[in-house]
Image: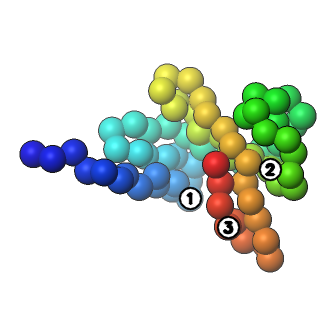
Amino acid sequence: MQTPVTRKLELASFGSWNFGDSSGTWSVEEASEEDWKEWGVEPYGPTKKLVLNGWSGDKASGPIEESDERIDFFW
C-alpha cells in the first residue's frame, strides 16, 4: 500500500480540524509582534493568525492572508 503524497487539512465549522490521523481544535486570533518573531518572518500585512491546537502534541500557528473579506491563503 502506498502512502499518499498529499493530504487535506480539514477545518470544520464547529472548530475542529483533521489532517490524516492527527486532529484537534482551531481558532482565529490576532497576530502579535511575538508571532512574527516566532515565525521568523517580517510582518507583511496579515493581522490574523490560524491556531491549530493539538498539532504534534502542541500547537501551530501562521498568518492568514485575506482580500475582499475572504481567506486567500494561510501558512
Q: Looking at the picture, tell me which residue is in the foreground, 67 or 42.
A: 42
Query: Residue 29's spot in the image, x, y percent?
Result: 78, 44
Residue carrying label 3: 72
Residue 73 at what x, y percent from top left? Answer: 65, 61
- The nearer-to-camera label among 1 and 3 is 3
Q: Earlier in the sequence, mark 2 or mark 1?
A: 1
Residue topped by disc 1: 13
Looking at the rendered image, the quarter that the N terminus falls into is top left
Query: Is the residue marked by circle 1 packed among few (<14), some (14-19), or many (20+) residues within 10 Å?
Result: few
Q: Amino acid at mark 2?
A: Lys
What amino acid type should be assigned to the residue bearing mark 3? Asp
Q: Residue at the location (46% across, 52% down)?
A: 9
Q: Secondary structure at mark 2?
A: strand
Colour pattern: rainbow
- How many callouts does the rendering have? 3
Rounded to the nearest whole Å, what is the CA distance between mark 2 and mark 1?
18 Å
What residue would you read off at disc 2?
48
| Front position among marks 2 and 1 | 2
Residue 41 % position (x, y): 79, 39
